[in-house]
């Protein structure tokens, strides 16, 4: 816990016994600190020195919440690691998971628990799973909550890449339940020491306290942003994710589609495409050298995401426009089926390696203005 670590570092200045704790100062002053695992600590008036003011700030922080992160994939484990480093208890369920997933969860400091245990112990449940599994997990958790006597103050945040209609249907699963619901979306990749993705969140008016509490998770390592304003509610954070991913991952789908189509015409066509991109659109070619390799191991996840984006577009614009991302769903499914060394994957890898070599050999040559 940060406050205790700080106090241990200052052991030459004063000492602390946890629980009903006593802090003794060199001047002989005495102050009683109440330390509780479920409420804020309190600190009486201290001498107004900078170091003691810092101690007061740390000691009056809320106690770390217990957070369940389902599941410990690359994103979930990275988020969990943020929480555990901040002093939070992080739960997950590892039943039936692969050895590599179990190892990733342990490295992130996550504790294995059943859904029933999570329902009883957790203050928050963050669902971070493939979009195609989001509804089924919410239903399973609701059942576990009802049969295990869950925490009446628990809040559930769906952080998955699903359409507004899908997240609204997930929210309805918890109707009539004490569980508060937050629609959340993650913009960016897994958090690292030098990088913070954005967690946008929206909620129904009756769950605005849960929305504010979700934003408060910023105290434990997340970059959280409340999506409020005219008409904001459940579905809007997910709508933002659909629009953003429709551009970013849609662009990757577009480039991969054109590379494969060019190669299907002839390898010479693909080679010419690479050289023309280098000449007239060098930034696009450089992005391809990063985005295509990064996409390959995640293609299976992006199939469902493209389908959700298609539903989002169809709801707002109609059926014709929705076919764009349906096509990208087919593309990502095609790539997934070609892994690890199928022909389509080999074509994409050859294109990337050729592009890297061309960029390196030219020293990043200047582009001519496209017509």
Image: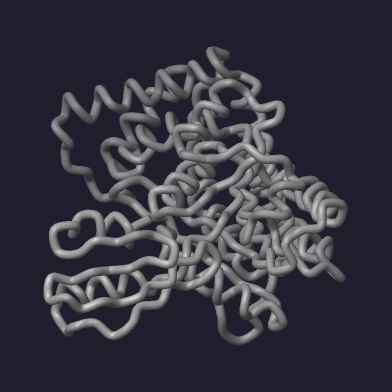
- Residue at x 83%, y 67% (from the top left corner): 177
Residue 209 point in image, percent of width and height: 62, 79
Of 54 and 41, the residue lying toward us: 41
* Left or right: where 19 falls relative to 298: left
* Left or right: where 326 falls relative to 213: right
Of 107 and 284, the residue lying toward us: 107
Q: Would residue 139 be visible to someone looking at this image?
A: no
Residue 102 point in image, percent of width and height: 57, 28
Q: How is the image coloured?
A: one colour
- Residue at x 18%, y 71% (from the top left corner): 25
Query: Would you identify the image quadrant in which residue 46 lies?
Result: bottom left
User: In the rendered view, would you say 302 is above or below 124?
Assistant: above
Query: Would you identify the image quadrant in which residue 322 lies?
Result: bottom right
Q: Would residue 90 be visible to someone looking at this image?
A: yes
Residue 155 point in image, percent of width and height: 67, 65
User: In the rendered view, would you say 296 is above or below 190?
Assistant: above
* Left or right: where 236 falls relative to 151: left
Of 282 and 301, the residue lying toward us: 301
Quarter of the image that includes the N terminus = bottom left
- Residue at x 29%, y 55% (from the top left corner): 5
């Amino acid at each position: 816990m940060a406050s205790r670590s700080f106090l241990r570092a200052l052991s030459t200045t004063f000492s602390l016994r946890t629980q009903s704790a006593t802090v003794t100062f060199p001047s002989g002053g005495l102050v009683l600190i109440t330390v509780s695992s479920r409420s804020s600590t309190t600190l009486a008036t201290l001498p107004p020195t900078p170091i003691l003011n810092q101690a007061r700030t740390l000691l009056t922080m809320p106690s770390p919440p217990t957070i369940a992160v389902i599941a410990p994939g690359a994103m979930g484990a990275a988020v969990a690691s943020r929480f555990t480093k901040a002093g939070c208890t992080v739960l997950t369920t590892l039943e039936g998971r692969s050895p590599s997933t179990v190892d990733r969860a342990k490295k992130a400091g996550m504790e294995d628990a059943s859904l029933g245990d999570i329902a009883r112990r957790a203050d928050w449940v963050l669902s971070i799973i493939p979009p195609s599994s989001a509804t089924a997990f919410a239903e399973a958790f609701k059942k576990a909550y009802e049969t295990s006597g869950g925490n009446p103050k628990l809040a559930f945040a769906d952080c998955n890449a699903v359409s507004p209609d899908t997240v609204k249907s997930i929210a309805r699963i918890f109707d009539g339940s004490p569980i508060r619901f937050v629609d959340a979306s993650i913009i960016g990749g897994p958090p690292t020491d030098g990088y913070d993705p954005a967690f946008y969140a929206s909620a129904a008016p009756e769950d605005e306290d849960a929305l504010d509490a979700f934003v408060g998770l910023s105290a434990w390592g997340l970059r959280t942003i409340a999506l409020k304003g005219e008409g904001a509610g459940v579905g809007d954070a997910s709508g933002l994710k659909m629009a953003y991913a429709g551009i970013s991952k849609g662009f990757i789908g577009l480039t991969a589609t054109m590379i494969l189509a060019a190669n299907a015409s002839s390898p010479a066509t693909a080679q010419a495409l690479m050289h023309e991109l280098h000449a007239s659109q060098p930034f696009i070619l450089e992005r391809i050298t990063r985005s295509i390799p990064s996409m390959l191991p995640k293609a299976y996840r992006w199939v469902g995401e493209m389908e959700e984006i298609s539903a989002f577009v169809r709801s707002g614009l109609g059926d014709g426009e929705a076919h764009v991302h349906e096509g990208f769903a087919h593309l990502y499914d095609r790539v997934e089926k070609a892994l690890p060394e199928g022909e389509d994957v080999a074509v994409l890898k050859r294109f990337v390696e050729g592009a890297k070599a061309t960029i390196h050999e030219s020293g990043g040559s200047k582009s001519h203005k496209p017509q």
